Amino acid sequence: MRNKKDIWIRCFVAFLVACILTGVIATGIFYKLDNTLNDSFYQKERILDGNIFVIGIDTKSLEELGPYQTWPREYMAKAIEILNQDEEHRPAAIGIDVLYTGRTNDKDDKALAKAAGKYGNVVMATTANFTSQLEENNDMLYLNDYTIESYEEPYKELKENSIQGHINSMYDKDGVIRHLIRTIDLPNGESVNSLNYELYRLYAKEHGLKLNEVPVNSERHTWYLSYSGGPGAYNDGFSFSDLLSGNISPEIFEGAVVLIGAYAPGLMDYCTTAIDHSQVMYGVEIHANAIDALIRNDFKKEISDEMQLVLLFIVCFLFLFLLYRKKILFSSIVWLLSGFSYIGIAYFSYQQGYLLHISWIPFSITVIYIGMIAWNYVLETMEKHRVTNTFKHYVAPEVVNKILENQEELELGGKMTDIAVLFVDIRGFTPMSEILSPLEVVEILNRYLDLTSRCILRNKGTLDKFVGDATMAFFNAPIEQEDYVYQAVKTAWDMVQESHALNQELIEKYGRSVGFGIGVHCGPAVVGNIGAKIRMDYTAIGDTVNTAARLESNAPAGQILISREVANRLEGRIKVTSLGDTIKLKGKAEGFEVLRMEGLIEET
């Protein structure tokens, strides 16, 4: 029954914690951190195939050709002509990552349109401008932040003589580009492919490749980009001005994809990408990465957050259920194995084309692991405190504390220590027990033993043992004490004084009274763990102990007998009456002086 209850408690706690952690993750509070970790774990540079080139409109070009805004369109027309001048060694596709929307000079406009349409391998850029707009769906209003406000495309002649592809990018909520837009659906019903896809299509046609299908992830036709190179990876130092001046041989680009676009800070065409958060990447390089992924058929399908949250809940539930109240070593092993196993699974899944959140499960099981360690520590501390307090009812508190402080002292053996030993026994208890019921006997005995125990502990003594109706205690071990002999006789005196009230109560209730016979002696004794390895007592043995016991056995009710050694050490602090050698102690030679303690001398 107990086990079944524990299982239900464990299930409830596991369910509750799994719900809380899953709910916290679902809020998206760790969105930025999670995506940053995903990027650093998944996005890695690889060796490029050398089939994609970037010709940059760079700082050198601006210095040699002047500000970009003043360039005649004849420059781009000439660049296209140069790249296509050798029909046998021309590029498979040329992408112009520059917008040519309005008309300028009629001659230049016609020259660019003619060059773009002459070879059939040029893709010109278009772009859609998005805005947010309230829309109605099934009588419900919602904010559509993907509404196309305007669409910019090449001027009429250029549009009619070229292929077009949009250059829009999809920024995630943290301002990082991880997704690209495969297709944009225009308000007029037309669809426009991306610039990178159109260039890939021309490349595949030129090389006789079957077009790979792009797995889009939403109604917005977005797909996750697995980058091949970081900022600068596709920059081979080809400058637009060098191309125009004839310093670059067009044969280099045979059968490849050539991208011409902004590659200077002043042109403001750059952003942060998943492969490197510390350095921005120019837009033309993002297209290069996209084309490379399209050619390699390197697509990653993002497992839905809903499915991953379900998986997270299951893992959290099982993990906590397994770790509930387990030892730290076991918990640590399970935590490490689980965390590294998931990371391995995530990496393998990525290689197979499936994208998992790298941090959700490791973070959650780490929280559970730390929480379980903390909780188990609290429980163990509480249990230790409970056991310690319970143990102190059976063993002297000083001994318990000593054991807890130094486990190494739990070895058989002892050491010679100077101690004061006290024995106390109840006089008249046996005749009383003969006329009382067993329950009454036990009640009276417990009250007397409680009295002796309180007096011993109050005076910092070590309660050694109960032997029937007798009590043994010693002072100055296991903790050294400065005035241990005085503390021993004060304990004896307290016992006698406090027994008066209890005796009066017994007389009124049973018509009989009892008293204490007490013996105190001091001297060297062996103190330590005596017994067997499986069961030992922390006690004292030796002649000093035996002498104290014999003094007690000869003490009448209500009297405290001490040795001359005790009296000498406490001279001037206690009142005594010498009994000489009138009391013969077993095992002691003639002349052993016994004294009766009459009281304490108050110190001023």
Image (cartoon, grey):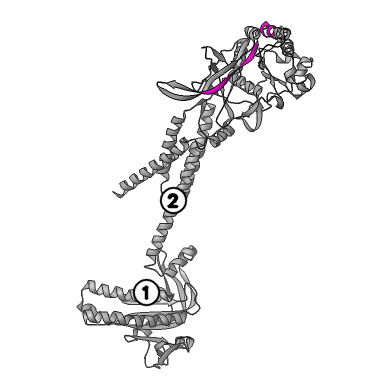
Q: Residues within 10 Å of mark 1 (few under 14, many from 20)?
A: many
Residue 13 forms part of the magenta stretch? no
Q: Is residue 454 above or below residue 380?
A: below
Q: Which element is circle 2 on?
A: helix
Q: Is residue 87 above or below residue 185?
A: above
Image vertical order of residue 77 relative to residue 553, above or below? above
Residue 56, visible in the rendered structure: yes
Tell which of 8 and 560 is nearer to you. 8
Q: How many residues crowd mark 2 within 10 Å: few (<14), some (14–19), many (20+)?
A: some
Examine the rendering and report whether any part of residue 298 can be seen: no
The residue depicted at 68 percent of the width and 23 percent of the height is 234
In the rendering, which numbered label is found on residue 467?
A: none
Residue at the disc numbered 1: 453
Q: Position of residue 78 (x, y in %)?
A: 74, 11
Q: Percent position (x, y) of residue 215? A: 51, 20
- Residue 375's tag is 2
- Indicate yes or no whether the magenta region holds residue 118: yes
Q: Nearer the viewer, residue 229 or 161?
A: 161
Say which residue appears at 20% left-offset and 74% top-offset. 437
Q: Nearer the viewer, residue 115 or 295?
A: 115
Q: Amino acid at mark 1?
A: Ser
Mark 2–mark 1 contact, CB under 8 Å? no
Q: Mark 2 is on which residue type?
A: Trp
The segment highlighted magenta reads 112-133
Say which residue appears at 41% left-offset and 57% top-offset: 382
Which quadrant of the figure has residue 422?
bottom left
Q: Earlier in the sequence, mark 2 or mark 1?
A: 2
194 is higher (above) or lower (below) than 413: above
Q: What is the spatial separation of the Cα atoms under label 2 and label 1, in whole angstroms?
A: 36 Å
